[in-house]
Image: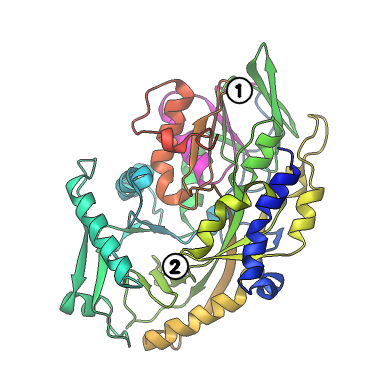
Amino acid sequence: MAITRRKFLIGGGIVAVAAGAGILTPMLTREGRFVPGKPRHGFVAGTEGPLPQQADVVVIGAGILGIMTAIELVGRGLDVVIVEKGNIAGEQSSRFYGQVITYKMPDETFLLHHLGKQRWREMNAKVGADTSYRTQGRIEVPFDEEDLVNVREWIDTRSKNVGSDIPFKTRIIEGAELNQRLNGAQSKWTIAGFEEDSGSLDAEIATFVMADYAKKLGIKIYTNCAARGLETQAGVISDVVTEKGPIKTSRVVVAGGVWSRLFMQNLGVDVPTLPAYQSQQLITGSPTAPGGNVALPGNIFFREQADGTYATSPRVIVAPVVKDSFVYGYKYIPLLSMPDFPVHISLNEQLINSFTEPTSWKMDEVSPFEKHRNMTALPDLPELNASFEKLKTEFPAFKDSKLIDQWSGAMAIAPDEHPIISQVNEYPGLVINTATGWGMTESPVSSELTADLLLGKEPSLNVKPFSLYRFS
């Protein structure tokens, strides 16, 4: 999409708002750069040998969305090939926070999450391996009185209209139960929302286990094999063109994460998303630390992992200013003032890089994907370090905890924060599954919806809120 003068001025308002709020200097010093990386703590080898000449379906992207979609399609009797520009789970799918929750989810995405929890509870038995999934329970203390009122209303509404036979198990807790679940807290918390059946997945394990399972099902996953684009005949998809050659197919799923927009741009299809990063860290645990998943005011968040370590994350999103910010940035301005999940703007060389990155190329040319095999964002170390200190102050049980790792993951976010799970009208036989910060939670169900759309079946859920064209 071309940047008109009007779009440049309107979209640039996101920068003006930030500067007017007195945060231009932090924008220039805050991390948010996109740099080469590798999968975190895990590795699953890709399929060896030459590409197949044809497949029933080609899935582009070997993150959790691509892998789960391929598994779903194989379960429906199709021959599926995955092509991946870098490594399996080389980017966001080995860097997620790992909470599988429904808490405060809006109507549009609630069932994606509610059903997703149920699917994950059955996953270990399905794949015959430990995905790291645990049902552990999650506590979130409201950050103010208005938040508490909203939570009460949300729980009341959901209790009366779950939309599923799977029980809804979120309630308000206080008193002795709250004190017991926040054992050792220094603050006198009086009330909280408790999601009894929330789940936990570890970034170091889950996607890699699912990739192994996919390979056991016969799914071929070709790594370091970027998809450059599609070819058509008589308006119908005929081939996926990769750097290693074409694969004949009439059905394609794009699950490229933060790269989906760029891939679709080369096809002349606009996918309105902007990149965003969330920093996280892993620390050693303590026998006296409270378990489960906890979110407290003051930017204190932790989740116990399967091995007894703890994932912690300041609840802050870093959004780099890029060329596309001048197209869509104004639509994201309301997110800057969200009290429970603030967005920080970063201004760095990624802005310049975004203007020099090609958005179109020929099928016999090296694509940007071949130049960016496994990318990650640099972590926001000041935010991480500050949140770690707050955690130790609030829960002295963590005072001797050691830092194991710090990282940041990149994701693409749509203006309404809902995923894009949609047929692409311009290319019959093409479905896109992208633009979510909740890929692990949603993937078991979003993969079912993707398969339904690809095969022309009536989706099991309402997919209109996830349509690519809802922004038109």
Q: Residues within 10 Å of mark 1 (few under 14, many from 20)?
A: some
Q: Pick whichever, 452 or 39, lies toward us.
A: 452
Circle on res. 339: 2
Per the image, the residue denoted by label 1 is 427
Q: Does residue 113 appear left or right of residue 222 in this picture?
A: left
Residue 229 included in the magenta stretch of the image: no
Name the disc covering residue 150, or none.
Answer: none
Find out whether residue 80 is within the magenta segment. yes
In primary-sequence order, the first of circles 2 and 1 is 2
User: Which image quarter holds the N terminus?
Assistant: top right
> Is 354 on the left-hand or right-hand side of 420?
right
Label 2 crowd bin: few (<14), some (14–19), many (20+), radius 10 Å: few
Stretch of the chain drawn in magenta: 54-83
Number of callouts: 2
The type of residue carrying mark 2 is Pro
Rendered location of residue 113, percent (x, y): 35, 48
* SS label for mark 2: loop
Q: Quadrant of residue 40?
A: bottom right
Q: Is residue 139 visible?
A: no
Q: Circle 1 sits in a helix, a strand or a loop, which is it?
A: loop
Nearer the camera: disc 2 or disc 1 = 2
Instruction: State the residue at coordinates (40%, 42%).
Output: 444
Callout 2 touching callout 1 (CB < 8 Å) = no
Q: Is residue 238 above or below residue 335?
A: above
Q: Quadrant of residue 259?
A: top right
Q: Residue at x 39, y 54 (%)?
A: 130
Towards the viewer: 443 or 348: 348
Query: Label 1 amino acid?
Result: Tyr
Q: Which quadrant: the C terminus?
A: top right
x, y percentage for residue 281?
52, 71
